[in-house]
Amino acid sequence: MTTYRKIEVTPIAGALGAEIGGGDLSALPDDATFDEIRQAFHEYLVIFFRNQTMTPEQHRDFGRRFGELDIHPFAAGLDDFPEVMPVIKEAGDNTSNFGGTWHTDVTFYEKPALGSILYALDVPKSGGDTMFANMYMAYDALSDGMKLMLDGMTAMHDASRSYGATNSRAAERLKKNSGSMKIRTGIDSTRQVEHPVIRTHPATGRKGLFVNANFTHNFKGWTEAESEPLLQYLYDHAVRPEFTCRFRWQPGSVAFWDNRCTQHFALNDYAGHRREMHRVTVIGERPV
Ligand code: SIN
């Protein structure tokens, strides 16, 4: 276990997740503090900060310390800060929510996200928590036989299930549910990219399971029907309770998760209440 001198690190669960004390993200941390934040990020996979106050510009600038930022192709960012994407569910939206299924962000890119930084502006008094799952643990818990098979496989990912123009059910649901978010659907959502099913984290060297129900379409060389049962098994396996943690938001909370070794799930249990977050997404590297 690492010794931290610049920040306080308090794990929130056995599997992953730690609260970080002692960092003010609006004033960009000095290099030594930043190095410890990065270390905690690698050690705990998702890190949380409390009582932050960040303008969209400061949020963007904090994200830029970790790499180039994404502009989401289907969900609009703020007019003046397109890299900052509002994630909003209004009190009157009694429908589904953004991120309300287990997933890893934007794996439909050739270079999917390194991480996402979510900042809470307005949260319900109770409900609206986010859960995270540790994909290293999911991989480690597979049998040797399953590991051997999956290690040699790749899978095709696309955005059609979430943003498909030709998938009328998804398009209809999005139109009804996007509330204050500006979400578009499009034929470009069907563009496929290929990723290893088991990826090796570029910083930690650890192997993790890298398929998710939002964007993984099929195993390469397998039909969708052939892929479905094994994918479903892996989706269920990946989020076993002992691989997860759950974060309770307050206004000013920030979560920074590593999309290369986690999945997350935004609970939709706050009907009649408003929730507003801002997300910045750091672009990662090609999975290997
Ligand atoms: C997301 O999937 O980016 C949204 C997570 C959340 O709103 O908690």
Image (cartoon, rainbow, N blue to C red):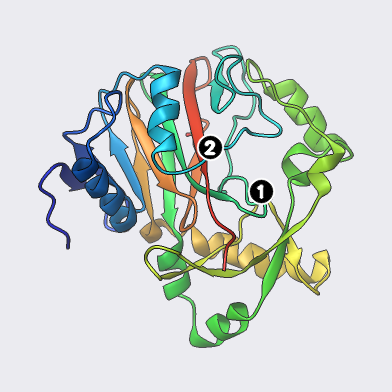
Q: Nearer the viewer, residue 124 or 259?
A: 259
Q: Nearer the viewer, residue 57 or 180?
A: 57
Please say if 140 is above or below 148: above
Please say if 20 is above or below 120: below
The residue where tag 2 is placed is 69
Q: Residues within 10 Å of mark 2 (few under 14, many from 20)?
A: many
Viewport quadrant of the C terminus: bottom right
Q: Residue furthest right?
A: 166
Q: CA distance from mark 2 to mark 1?
A: 21 Å
Residue 234's label in the rendered image is none
Of pointers 2 and 1, the one earlier in the residue sequence: 2
Q: Is residue 165 left or right of residue 16?
A: right
**In terms of secondary structure, where does tag 2 sit?**
loop
Q: At which x and y percent is residue 222? A: 80, 73
Using the rendered image of the protein, determine whether residue 12 is visible from the camera's viewpoint. no
**Disc 1 residue type (three-letter):** Asn
**In terms of secondary structure, where does tag 1 sit?**
loop
Q: Is residue 193 left or right of residue 253?
A: right
Residue in the picture at 87% in, 35% down: 168
Q: At which x and y percent is residue 7? A: 16, 41
**Disc 2 residue type (three-letter):** Leu
The residue where tag 1 is placed is 214
Residue in the picture at 59% in, 51% down: 112
Using the rendered image of the protein, determine whether residue 231 is visible from the camera's viewpoint. yes
Q: Quadrant of residue 217?
A: bottom right
Q: Is residue 21 left or right of residue 190?
A: left
Q: At which x and y percent is residue 218? A: 75, 64
